[in-house]
Image (cartoon, helix red, strand yellow):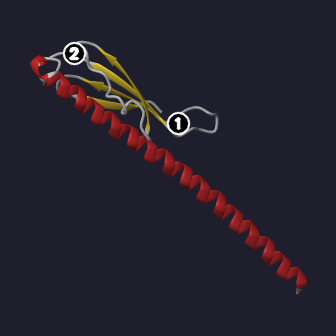
């Protein structure tokens, strides 16, 4: 009788241990997906701001059909989702976003690139 109870306790501990490991893995995967979604959302918002600057006349503080002079607004270059850097040309803006989730190797898990044109915004997730 004692051996059977000991065996059941050991089996219960193993099952609980496996459940904890699976739960931690699911949590990490969910955190990465949430960070990826947040970075993509931020990039779309920044792209819309760039297009707004492009379409606004220079007399109103815009670009007058050029992206030249547009920068990421102060405070939005680094958010809870990630950090963002822009590269501005006359007819395109490229914004690179690095997420805040850090992988096991110490590198950023989420990185995405947004390309903004006068009428288009496209986001590509790099990893």
Residue 28: assigned label: none
| Vertical comparison of 31 with 106: above or below | below
For the residue pair 76 and 124, the one nearer the viewer reads as 76
**Quarter placement of the N terminus:** bottom right
- Residue at the image point whose x is 33% and y is 40% from the top: 41
Residue at the right extreme of this rendering: 2
Vertical position of residue 84 compared to residue 9: above or below: above
- Residue 115: x percent and y percent? 30, 24
Position of residue 67 in the picture relative to residue 3 (left or right):
left
Q: Earlier in the sequence, mark 2 or mark 1?
A: 2
User: Residue 71: which quarter of the image?
Assistant: top left
- 72 left or right, relative to 59: right
Q: Position of residue 28 (x, y in %)?
A: 56, 50
Side (left or right) of 105 relative to 58: right
Q: Choose between 84 and 115: the one closer to the eye.
A: 84
In the figure, residue 61 lies in which quadrant? Answer: top left
Q: Residues within 10 Å of mark 1 (few under 14, many from 20)?
A: some
Relative to 91, residue 109 above or below? below
Q: Which residue, given by chain and number where applicable, does mark 1 sit on?
A: 109
Q: Residue at x 74, y 73 (%)?
A: 12
Q: Quickly name the residue at label 2.
A: 91
The residue sitting at 36% across, 33% down in the picture is 76
Q: Secondary structure at mark 1?
A: loop
Asked whether disc 2 touches disc 1, contact meaning CB atoms under 8 Å apart, the reply is: no
Q: Quarter-wise, where is residue 66 in the image?
A: top left
Residue 125 at x, y = what percent?
Answer: 41, 33
Q: CA distance from mark 2 to mark 1?
A: 30 Å
Binning the other alpha carbons within 10 Å of mark 2 as few (below 14), some (14 to 19) or many (20 upward) gives few
Q: Where is residue 25 drawn, in percent x and y?
A: 59, 53
- Near-viewer residue (12 or 99): 99
Identify the residue shown where x is 68% and y is 62%.
Answer: 18
Q: Secondary structure at mark 2?
A: loop
């Amino acid at each position: 009788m004692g051996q059977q109870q000991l065996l059941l306790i050991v089996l219960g501990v193993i099952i609980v241990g496996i459940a904890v490991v699976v739960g931690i893995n699911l949590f990490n995967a969910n955190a990465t997906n949430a960070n990826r979604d947040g970075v993509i959302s931020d990039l779309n918002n920044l792209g819309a701001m760039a297009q707004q600057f492009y379409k606004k006349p220079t007399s109103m503080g815009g670009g007058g059909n050029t992206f030249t002079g547009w920068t990421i607004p102060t405070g939005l270059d680094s958010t809870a989702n990630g950090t963002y850097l822009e590269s501005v040309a006359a007819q395109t803006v490229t914004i690179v976003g690095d997420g805040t989730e850090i992988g096991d190797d110490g590198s950023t898990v989420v990185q995405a690139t947004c390309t903004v044109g006068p009428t288009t915004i496209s986001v590509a997730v790099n990893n």
